[in-house]
Amino acid sequence: MKQSYVQKLIRKRFAAYIVVLTLLPFSTCSAATHSASDTKAPYSKYDPVMIGKGYGNLRVKVIDGRTQKPLEGAEIVVLETERRYKTDVNGLTPWIKAPVIRSSRYRFLVNELHGQLTLISYKNGYRDSIHMGVRMNEGAVNKTTIWQYQIAPGLDRRIEPVVYIEPYHRLWLIQLADRFRRPSQLGEGYERP
Amino acid sequence: MSKIQQLSFFGTLGFLICGMLSASFPTQFAKAQTGAVGSTSFPSTIRVAIRENNASGEPDSRGRIIYVSNVNFDQYCRDVLPNEWFPNWNQSSLEAGAIAVKMFAWFHHLHPVTIDGFTFDVDNTVNFQTYRAESDQPTTDQAYYSTRNLAFVKTDSEILELNYRAGYENNPNWQYRNAGIMAQWGSEYWATQGRTPVQILEFYYMGRMIRTIPGVGRG
């Protein structure tokens, strides 16, 4: 017996519905799993380091800016990798394998002598601390200290992050100024004894 | 000129010379007494004048002095070295730098200055040496402690101000040797050539010698 066109269409649609209904729970499940992993470690697979760039070892110490005592349980974020680390009872993070990223602005003019990283430290009851320009070198062991300031109720009316910008190393600044110095406009003159 | 006039002239001249000598000798003698390794004790603290920051938040070498901080001498040297030398340079270069930083600080500890009513040994800028609290690095700390018991001094052990400047990269920087000033890039150059810290110091500071500081350990 030949099936009518309507019967064929109904059977095809039915099969399609079966397939969709079968796959739907799996798709929602996988989406739910993905969002759960995002909440836990949102950027765990993100690594912006370019090929040929190196890493250094970094350890961050967080201290109370007023008492100079170590702060336990502060969360440090390395912005360039978006990874997070907690400080221990001595205010120290574990050793971090951190990338050495030099600014591309100067790359073809004067090679920067060190890379720079940006860190943010968070802790309940303290002002957020943004630490820019942390110096990094390939294969080198580096450490840095972040000062955090306790929020004093009544005194701190306007609570905003504290920023600390680590300057470029003076040896590189000397090279940079000499690189663009014109012989007819000496200024302080070339580096000399 | 009569005989009396001659006598009074030479008498006055002699008096002036004696006065000048008596004024200069005790000072030099005292300086040699207080500024020699062995006769002067290793500093425990150093007075660091903290200058105000410029608009971008870095210490201004022409800024006002805000206060004077008493800093542990070892800690001061450790917090200067990574800001003057590069922490990832060769160990020989860092050790030569550690000795220079220490001797510079020791010399100024013995020769304090008073500016704007503040008496201090050094300030935290390139007027003296770049100092940033809590900036010490593991490699530079190691270089400092491995040379902590060593001094680089005149042949009579007098403590010197060991000066240094940046110099030029990948270059022995002979002109700095002629000026008696260590080139920092030069120290790294010689370190890559396999020179020891003492050889690097002897290259730039001619006629000086290494000495062990009595009673000072490496720890």
Image (cartoon, coloured by chain):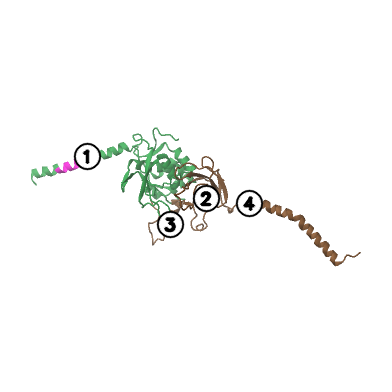
Subunit of label 1: B
Q: Which mark is residue B162?
A: none
Q: Are the numbered discs 2 and 1 placed on the same chain, yes or no?
A: no
**Where are the magenta residues, as a range?**
B12-20
Q: Which residue is mark 2?
A: A119
**Image coordinates for residue A35, horizontal then vertical, percent:** 65, 52
Quarter residue B39 falls in = top left
Subunit of label 2: A
Describe the element under mark 4 as helix, strand or loop: helix
**Residue at 82% across, 62% down:** A12
Mark 3: give few (<14), some (14-19) or many (20+) Cα within 10 Å: some
Which one is in front in this view, the residue at disc 4 or the one at disc 1? 4
Direction right: furthest residue: A1
- Whole-number angstrom distance, CA of label 3 to CA of label 2: 28 Å
The disc labelled 3 sits on which kind of residue? Ala
Circles 4 and 1, Cβ within 8 Å, touching? The answer is no
Q: Which residue is mark 1?
A: B22
Which one is in front in this view, the residue at disc 3 or the one at disc 2? 2
Direction front: furthest residue: A154
- Whole-number angstrom distance, CA of label 2 to CA of label 4: 21 Å
Mark 4: give few (<14), some (14-19) or many (20+) Cα within 10 Å: few
